[in-house]
Image (cartoon, helix red, strand yellow):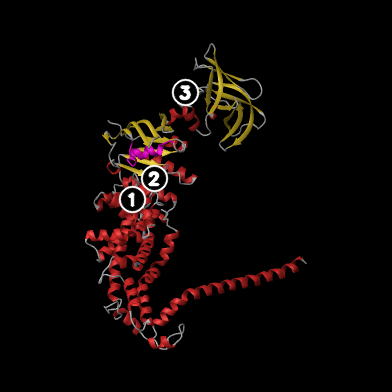
Amino acid sequence: MADMSYTPTQTGSNVGKIALRWGLYLMLGLFALFYLMPLFVMITTSFKSLEEIRTGDLISLPREVTLDAWRTAWSGACTGIQCEGVRPFFWNSVLIAIPAVFISTLIGALNGYVVAQWRFKGANLFFALMLFGCFIPFQVVLLPMARMLGLMGLAGTIPGLIFVHVIYGLGFTTLFFRNYYVSIPSELTKAAKVDGAGFFRIFWSVFLPLSLPIIVVTVIWQFTQIWNDFLFGISFSQAGTQPVTVALNNIVNSTTGIKAYNVDMAAAIIAALPTLFVYVVAGKYFVRGLTAGSVKG
Amino acid sequence: MAPILEINNLFKNYGSVEILKDINVAIEQGDFLVLVGPSGCGKSTLLNCIAGLEPITSGKMAIDGQDMTNVSPKDRDIAMVFQSYALYPTMTVAKNITFGMKVRGIDQAVQDEKLAHVAKQLQIEPLLNRKPGQLSGGQRQRVAMGRALVRDPKLFLFDEPLSNLDAKLRVEMRTEIKALHQRLGASMVYVTHDQIEAMTLATKIVVMKGGVIQQIGTPAEIYNRPANLFVADFMGSPAMNLIPARTKANGKGMQVEIARKDGDPIMLTDTRNRDLPENVIIGVRPEDIADASIARAGETQEADCMIDIVEPAGADTFAVMQLGGKHVTARLHSETSAAAGASQRLTFDLGKVSYFEPETGLRLN
């Protein structure tokens, strides 16, 4: 009797479970669709001709795939009076982002190593001030920074933009490396000291080889920040040194007459591709580095 | 010949907190000095001061006659083995061992030769190309020792090197360290909280508590003549019985009176000591209380005691009773007839007894 009354409820709950599971998938699927829709529209639009955009449906696939919009976006679209597409600005961004990411990561690693492993008087205050730097709204520093770049003779130059990005990235890179290195037992430093290694030798031979996960995290973070930056880019650049984000804005906003949606979309995708690429290549380390953070010796 | 290590009036403060107070220690070439004490007694800090990893607040320190007070660790000619082993995680075992030589720019051929020698000595040759993460605890311990041995320093420093190993391996490695010390004739300073490690390894023990040295001596001195109640209680397992007692002078020496839980006090005669205060704490090692039925050499006196608990431990049986209001442990023969709740005739050997002043805890005899 007990079994008989038990079995149906068991089946019932199984059905319920399956229904729940499918409900969940459906929901997740809808969310995914919702988030992917703009990307889908961007991609499809960028492959359509202007004619088709005018007459066709927003979310339909292109009837005829054309790369004209991409070509124009890359090397022909007008940003104000200049009509060279995003290409020169894309290279500006590369020239800014790569050195800035490299320098800020390296200095952040050194800072984190000092704060975590070579405790000095005022180390906590130093670290607290570095952290404070992470939370300053960038608008606040625009004027003083402009003055400083002027004094240094770097106003409107690519080295000037690299300098700005390095300075404002240091708070984060120091935080990342400090939190990573603080979990490494200080006995490791002591052992290396007894072995005769000095400050930089220990950093180079012992700590840096341990740091791949956190380097990846920092590089992704910094690259995304610097590549996507618009505020510093528009404030501290001049014609010829503008990054791709500023160029994209100019393409989209300064065209007169018919809006070339397909070109705008292609330019936007081009501007977003490098960060996407970095995520795909290094993404698995990103999650691993953020969550794990410990290397057991 | 100058002592291999000499520390004079060493003080160490962290801010206003005194960690080490007036430390004075000297050891000769070939000594095995063990710093022992409970957690937080300053023993590891003292070792770090010897290594130069912590600056000292005042005082002087010399290694082999040379003043090292303000010398950096790399120039002290020391090698150190750490509790966590502190192997470089990204380097192979071979690179771990040769790192110090590489830093010092020693010729590659010499490096290889020394590495091979040490690897053979510690039997870690098959491990040389592995990373520390692929090794067991005992293997890591060996590699850490190898890294120290390859230096051939004036002074070896060990910071609780065995405390992360399981019990069986710990005993094995302990024996190995002792054999190594005998073979090399090297001078070593070893920190541990384990008093058995201290007793078995040391040629000289420093017992510390609260940053102050309680006693310095050979293992036998520390064990047989503890300088105060703390040392008496800390060294030895099971611990020394510390029983409140009263003394009275008599013709042959003095009479010692120990209260029993029920019945008359036990009266013992001590012919070696006299003129002690009336109230004392008497320290008797468990092995100095034995079965009366099993004959023992020495000056013994008998008394009946009510046994509360019997703990067989294989080679010995421990019997716990109450004397002078304290639990007292006797180390009896494994085939003793003692039973819980029954009275047993025991012998007391006062030959190695210690007396302490109850207020100050200092040794009286």
Mark yes or no: residue B184 visible.
Answer: no
| First to last magenta residue range | B41-56
Front-most of B341 and B233? B233
How dense is the environment of label 3, judged by Cα within 10 Å: few (below 14), some, or many (20 and up)?
Answer: many
Q: Residue at x 44, y 58 (%)?
A: A292
Give the structural element (helix, strand or loop) at label 3: loop
Q: Which residue in the structure is indicated by mark 2? A: B82
Q: Which label sits on residue B105?
A: none
Same chain for labels 1 and 3? Say yes or no.
no
User: Which three-letter amino acid code belongs to the residue tagged 3?
Assistant: Arg
User: Which three-letter amino acid code belongs to the residue tagged 2?
Assistant: Phe
Give the farthest residue toward the right. A1
Same chain for labels 3 and 2? Say yes or no.
yes
Whole-percent x, y for residue A224 in the image: 37, 66
* Rendered image quadrant of residue B300: top right
Q: Which residue in the structure is indicated by mark 3? A: B363
Q: Are marks 1 and 3 in contact (CB under 8 Å)?
A: no
C-alpha separation, residue under disc 1 versus residue under disc 2 = 22 Å
User: As drawn, is B183 to the left or to the right of B267?
Assistant: left
Q: Is residue B330 above or below residue B99?
A: above
Mark yes or no: residue A173 visible.
Answer: yes
Q: Residue at x 49, y 14 (%)?
A: B275
Magenta span includes B93: no
Magenta span includes B43: yes
User: As drawn, is A108 to the left or to the right of B40?
Assistant: left
Same chain for labels 1 and 2? Say yes or no.
no
